[in-house]
Image (cartoon, rainbow, N blue to C red):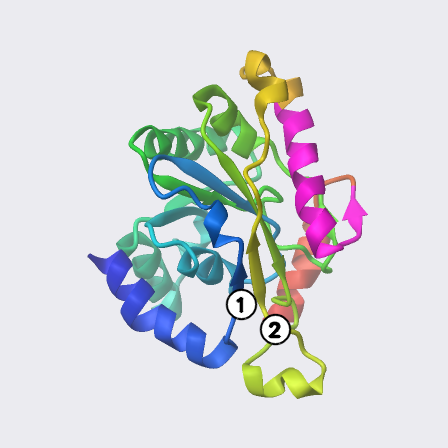
Amino acid sequence: MWYWFFKFVVVGPFALAVYRPAWHGREHLPRTGPFVLAANHTSMIEPAFVSLGVPRRVVFVAKRKYYDGRGPKGRVLGWFLTAIGQVPIDVDSAQTAAPALATASRILQEGGVWAVFPEGTRSPDGRMFRGRTGCMRVALPLGVPVIPVALTGARGGGPWWTWRHGRSRLTVTYLEPFDTSPWADRADDPAAWREATDDLMARIRAVTGQDYVERHATPEEIGRRDAHDS
């Protein structure tokens, strides 16, 4: 109940009125059955817009720190994420990520939609960083469709009335399903997860035009990003 209330009564109308986003490629979204949405990540507002373009319930994972915040703001955010059925994850360790990936697998096995940012965190500087393999670790063994999502205009973007000052319109593009068949017979092979993840990120980058960094963002880069945001 809370998911649909927030999506269509609270978040949706506000987002449409303030940001006037554009969605493209919704014809590529499966009408039924499980699938994965895999997107680049440059801004905290992107999860809402990825979800709003999909007429089905979309489940993201969120870093555990967002559930454990202190003070009124932290408690409200934790309640909000829990109310809409989001899944906490610690992206710094493959071992601690395993329960969340198991939950994602269950969501897909039950016919649901799982959305993920393969980079694992927001880009600290607008570039695309190397994707983590969790998406393919879940999707390949299940054989479910993976829809690449290219997000542009969110980093540094703002309300529509600021566009004339050089800010960009937020655009969400759902691309054609990613072809996972080259790795179908290696679904449990970590090397296949890496190859498929790299190809997936290249597919998204071809649309976003981001510069690419062939490594994960460092804690120092993430710390500077968070300090700038606070």
Is-magenta flag for residue 203? yes
Q: Is residue 186 above or below residue 71?
A: above
Q: Which residues are magenta?
A: 193-213
Q: Residue at x 36, y 43 (%)?
A: 31
Q: Which numbered marker is on residue 113? A: none
What element does badge 1 sit on?
strand
- Which residue is disc 2 drawn over? 169
Where residue 60 appears, x then y in whole percent?
42, 47
* Picture quarter with the C terminus: bottom right
Q: Which residue is mark 1?
A: 22
Residue found farthest to the front:
27
Name which residue type carries label 1: Ala
Look at discs 2 and 1 and give the one toward the viewer.
Answer: 1
Most foreground residue, 59 or 125: 59
Work out whether residue 53 or residue 95 is closer to the camera in this orientation and state it.
53
> Which residue is depicted at the point 48% across and 28% down?
138
Of the numbered discs 2 and 1, the one sitting upstream in the chain is 1
Q: Position of residue 46 (x, y in %)?
A: 52, 60
Neighbourhood count class around disc 1 (C-alpha, 10 Å): few under 14, some 14–19, many 20 upward = few
| Camera-nearest residue between 45 and 22 | 22
Residue ID at (55%, 29%): 136
- Asked whether, in this view, residue 71 is left or right of residue 43, the answer is left
Q: Estimate the x, y position of residue 100 in percent, counting from the top left.
A: 42, 35
